Each structure stands twice: as C-alpha cells, then as structure tokens.
Amino acid sequence: MKEITKKEIDILLKNNVVRNTNRGFIGQNDYTVGFYRTRNRRYMEDKYVDIAKRLMSKG
C-alpha cells in the first residue's frame, strides 16, 4: 500500500478507474480496492496509486 493524496483519488474517480460505494472503493472489475485512512494520510493499493500518478502526469 502506498500513500495517495485527495487530488489523486479525485482523478481516479473522475476517470472511472474506481467508484465510491457504500462498500468502499470498487475497481473496474467490481472488486473492492484496498484503502486505509489514518488521521492525516490515505493509503491505497499500489496499482491504483501508480495509475493516478500516470494520469496526473498526462494532464
């Protein structure tokens, strides 16, 4: 798990890579995405953090 920013999460949601449901974040293949939040930081599975960083560098 890697640290992810709120801005990167917003990019993933905007590009339909993940969607937010009452069960948590769901990926494109309808599996739950590993997500953990502490008081000041958010962590998500490596795969999705890498996708978010790639999308940020494009746009």
Image: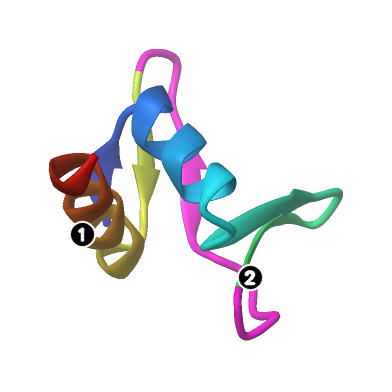
Q: Residue at x 80, y 57 (%)?
A: 23
Q: Mark 2 points at which residue?
A: 32
Please state the extent of the stretch shown in magenta in the rendering: 28-40
Report crowding for label 2: few under 14, some 14 to 19, many 20 or more residues within 10 A (C-alpha).
some
User: Which picture quadrant has residue 46?
Assistant: bottom left
In the image shown, does 35 or 59 lie closer to the viewer?
Answer: 59
Instruction: Give whichever of discs 2 and 1 has the lower sequence position.
Output: 2
Magenta stretch: residue 9 in it? no
Please say if 5 is above or below 51.
above
Q: Which of 15 and 4 is in front in this view?
A: 15
Q: Quadrant where the C terminus lies?
A: top left
Where disc 2 sits, the SS reads loop
Q: Which amino acid does label 1 sit on?
A: Asp
Residue reaching furthest bottom? 29
The residues bearing labels 2 and 1 have C-alpha atoms spaced at a distance of 17 Å
Residue 13 in picture, x, y percent from top left = 57, 46
| Residue at figure coordinates x 35%, y 43% from the top left | 43
Say whether residue 11 is left or right of residue 20.
Answer: left
Q: On the picture, is 56 further left or further right than 31?
A: left
Task: State yes or no: discs 2 and 1 in contact (Cβ < 8 Å).
Answer: no
Colour convention of the picture: rainbow
Kindly identify the amino acid type of the residue bearing the numbered disc 2: Thr
**Residue of label 1:** 50
In the rendered image of this protein, does residue 17 appear above or below residue 5?
below
Residue 26 is situated, as x and y percent measured from the top left of the image, at: 66, 65
Which residue is rendered at x = 30% and y = 50% of the image?
52
